[in-house]
Image (cartoon, helix red, strand yellow):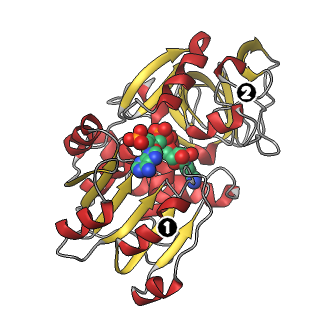
Amino acid sequence: MRAILISTPGGPDALTLTTVPELPIGPRDIRIAVAAAGVNRADVAQRLGNYPAPAGAPEWPGLEVSGTVTEIGPEVTRFRTGDRVCALLAGGGYATEAVVHEDLVLPVPDSVDLIDAAALPETLATVWSNVFMSGAPIAGAGLRAGETLLVHGGSSGIGTTAIQLAHLAGARIAVTAGTSEKLEACRSLGADILINYREQDFVAELKAATEDQGADVILDMVGGAYAARNIAALATDGRIMVIANQSGEKTAFNPFFLMQKRGHYSGTTLRSRPHAEKAAIIAGLHEDAWGWVQSGRYRPIIDSRFSFEDAAAAHRRMESSEHIGKILLVP
Ligand SMILES: NC(=O)c1ccc[n+]([C@@H]2O[C@H](COP(=O)([O-])OP(=O)(O)OC[C@H]3O[C@@H](n4cnc5c(N)ncnc54)[C@H](OP(=O)(O)O)[C@@H]3O)[C@@H](O)[C@H]2O)c1
């Protein structure tokens, strides 16, 4: 099989397509002939040497794939060879084959292009677990119909997912993004309040658009630099979910303002969660959100597709931040 390895941590040209031995398959694993792999920011961090693969995962990057089942372990019950699937991985997606426990696999409906389906698992699992699942990470804190969600980075892979899910769930959606083109894309997916964070103060804009109430839930991928402003933009009983620290900053805020709002400040990383938690997230997605995927009411937003030979260009595109939606690698 072929895989895209990181020759030496560094720039995009560190991504090297090479031949590796076939992966072993466990009793509840399935082997997937990869149709496409999703590109995620975490892959860029891994390439730079800042986010090594967890123990047990292949050394090459890739947190999600789509494809066709070619082999199943003896105890697999949910899938058969020939099935169209997509899967959440702890690593190893940038390859012509992936091996994954069946708990982390979802069926790809006929209505969804098999290559595009590689864009589904990582952002759906991240957004679902942080914004919607009632038990995690804050008990009973899932976004409810009629509430306001603020999504930073609305045009990102995560953002385009969060907008669509929140729209389907009947929430009001505010987004931040860095260009008017990106904001227009967010509007077309269902965003109601559009804030160009390079030109406008998102706290003031959000308050003006919500009769001073603010956001009930904030999905934050900016991190430290936004902490105090997120609390200022939060509604009473609001929940802030941090999923990245792109600003790279440590932060300080006055806890009194969080207390005053009876607010929650929480964070998660999907990749390092225990298997049982990831399995519960995938099961919850399948149970409660997959109908939207099947019916086409939720669709993967694809920015671009690159061949495996062009993996460096795919990473350059992600680092340029010019993309809207997901970038895919196709063997
Ligand atoms: N914790 C987890 O489990 C988890 C899981 C998946 C992803 N993530 C993280 O979530 C983030 C998004 O992932 P992705 O795959 O969707 O990446 P992506 O498509 O590359 O998105 C990054 C986005 O961040 C936006 N951004 C940067 N600075 C901003 C600011 N100050 N205000 C508002 N937006 C800003 C960029 O928008 P502009 O270009 O307009 O600035 C861009 O749309 C990444 O940092 C990723 O590592 C975390």
Q: Residues within 10 Å of mark 1 (few under 14, many from 20)?
A: many
From this view, report whether residue 90 is shown above or below residue 238: above
Q: Secondary structure at mark 2?
A: loop
Q: Secondary structure at mark 1?
A: helix
User: Mark 1 near mark 2, Cβ–Cβ under 8 Å?
Assistant: no
Q: Earlier in the sequence, mark 1 or mark 2?
A: 2
Looking at the rendered structure, the kind of residue marked 2 is Gly
Residue 169 falls in which quadrant of the image?
A: bottom left
Above/below status of 303 relative to 77: above
Q: Nearer the viewer, residue 292 or 310?
A: 310
Residue topped by disc 2: 10
Q: Residue at x 47, y 28 (%)?
A: 327
Picture quadrant of residue 180: top left
Whether residue 240 sits left or right of residue 181 in the image: it is right
Residue at image position (27%, 58%) is 174
Viewer-proximal residue among 144 and 322: 322
Location of residue 233 in the rendering, given as x and y in whole percent from the top left corner: 34, 71
Q: Position of residue 295 (x, y in %)?
A: 27, 41
Q: In what quadrant of the picture does the C terminus appear?
A: top right
